[in-house]
Image: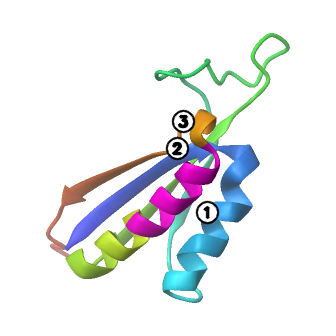
Amino acid sequence: MTRLEIIANNTVEEDIIEALDAVEEGFYYSKLSAVHGRGKSDPRKGDAIWPEENFIFIIYCDDDRAAEYANAVKEVKERFDGEGIKVFALPFQQIL
């Protein structure tokens, strides 16, 4: 099993949702909105100087589905190369 974390600019959220829905319509996720921070691209602070914000999708799924989701997000990243779209995968074990 895999925990995926997809971090991206709010401007590409609908594109990512469409890509993930193409893999599995009605996919399950948790969303963290208004995420602030700084990676290799410009800061995302949601203020007057750096007005943009990110979001994070957290998805728990089997390993094969995680690879499909990551490939779908990769295709979005190729279209929006400057947006700092990232995908992280972590193994997990459900204990409850």
Residue farthest to the right? 48
- Which residue is at a point 52% across and 20% down the rendered structure image? 38
State how far apart marks 2 and 3 are (Cα). Answer: 4 Å
Asked if marks 2 and 3 touch (Cβ < 8 Å), the reply is yes
User: Residue 40 appears at what percent x and percent y?
Assistant: 47, 21
Residue hosting label 1: 16
Residue type at numbered disc 1 = Ile
Q: Which element carries disc 2, helix, strand or loop?
A: loop
9 sits to left or right of 41: right
Image: magenta residue range:
71-80
Q: Above or below — where is 57 with respect to 40?
A: below
Any magenta on residue 12? no
Camera-side residue: 21 or 54?
A: 21
Residue type at numbered disc 2 = Ile
Residue hosting label 3: 84
User: Residue 31 appears at what percent x and percent y?
Assistant: 57, 58
User: Residue 87 appears at what percent x and percent y?
Assistant: 39, 50
Any magenta on residue 74? yes
Q: Which element carries disc 3, helix, strand or loop?
A: loop
Asked if marks 1 and 2 touch (Cβ < 8 Å), the reply is yes
- Which residue is at a point 69% across and 52% down the rendered structure image? 12
Q: How packed is label 3: few (under 14 Cα within 10 Å), some, or many (20 or more)?
A: some
Residue hosting label 2: 85
50 sits to left or right of 18: right
- The overriding secondary structure of the stretch rendered in magenta is helix
First-in-chain label (3 vs 1): 1
The C terminus lies in quadrant = bottom left
Q: How packed is label 1: few (under 14 Cα within 10 Å), some, or many (20 or more)?
A: many
